[in-house]
Amino acid sequence: MCQACSINYDQQNAFAERMVDIMNSAAIALMVSVGHRTGLFDSMAGRAHETSMDVAKHASLNERYVREWLGAMVTGGIVEYDPESQGYRLPAEHAAWLTRAAAPDNIAVSMQFIPMLGNVEDEIVECFKNGGGVPYTSYPRFHEIMAEESDQSVVSGLTEHILPLADGVMDRLNSGIDVLDVGCGCGHAMLELAEAFPNSSFTGYDLCKEAVDGANNTAKKAGLSNARFVQRDLTAFNESASFDLITAFDSIHDQKDPAGMLAGIAGALREGGVFLAQDIAGSSYVDQNIDSPVAPFVYTISCLHCMTVSLAQGGVGLGAAWGKELALEMMAEAGFTSVNVGELEHDFLNYFYVCTKDS
């Protein structure tokens, strides 16, 4: 029987409907990012129905653009519209997931990754044809977005949820220890800890000079003399027994040499030291990720950022979807003899690896 004769047309039509839905959802994602960056969601929250002119006025924005944006939000089911009054309203139930006041539950923050990744599509297509990678310099807003994302996923629960996963670390921080964050970005996690634990010293390493300079400026303005940030390529990371706690928040998988970095971390820990790593929850096997609610997003951001920035440096291109199985294998090979994988009830996106080694 020919392939055309065996087609299930109900299934074919259902798939077409799904593709249209994907196209619409992608468009809404772009407009949600715009709504976040322009402050429209924040401005509309808690208000009754308003005309587009009033919405624009309260947000100090151009009415014509606001009106078109509202059209996308209404037809996308995010904003309510009253035809009689020609008024728009952001329901409180939606504002709870879209405003800065809703942090750490503001999903609009993550929507910014969609337009950022779209900006490098041409370069990624060339990589599909010729290999290689796209460098960090092609992502001008990456550290800004990651800092905002980190504020929600890491900083907001750092002392209450994440650090307690490692037994005894909070007491040691209070007493005074040396802490290193690898791939620190804008340094928000270390700045938070430097303020909370003045007896401890905090260092951040990152490849990006702009991020490191910003972190040092923030530390200086806040009067945090126990925090410093250094521009450093972690490919040949090699410091002997220098730190009591090393952290890596969503930074291992996009390194040029993640295995070498893990080995360097193990060597840089003093006796009794702890390595605490946050990374994407998931399996190393694609079939085990099918039911994950964010698997398509993870594979996409991996292909369009995490994997390719590593390949751009001549690296291995591990990617965000490296998975727990490979992570545990690589951590063991790096010299960690005990690795506990923690999960937080409110965070379905991440695993937290608490790693130690024998004395």
Image (cartoon, helix red, strand yellow):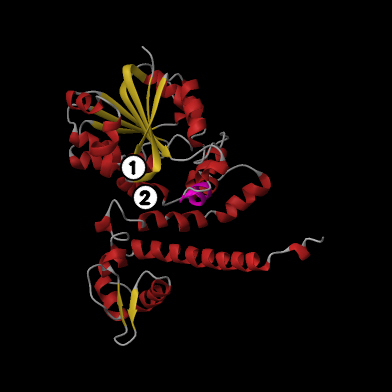
The residue carrying pointer 2 sits among few (fewer than 14), some (14 to 19) or many (20 or more) residues within 10 Å by Cα, namely few
Q: Main secondary structure of the magenta part?
A: helix
Say what secondary structure mark 1 lies in: loop
Q: Nearer the viewer, residue 297 or 206?
A: 297
Indicate the position of residue 38 as horizontal and vertical percent values. 33, 65
Mark 1 burial class by Cα count in 10 Å: few <14, some 14-19, many 20+:
many
* Secondary-structure class at tag 2: helix
Q: Mark 2 points at which residue?
A: 144
Residue segment shown in magenta: 293-301
Position of 335 relative to 308 (above/below): above
Front in this rendered view, residue 96 or 301: 96
Query: Looking at the rendered structure, which numbered label has been put on residue 186?
Result: 1
Q: Looking at the image, is mark 2 or mark 1 earlier in the sequence? A: 2
CB atoms at circles 2 and 1 under 8 Å apart?
Answer: yes
Q: Is residue 48 above or below residue 98?
A: below
> Can you name the residue that lies furthest to the right here?
1
Q: Which residue is drawn at 47% across and 48% down?
A: 292
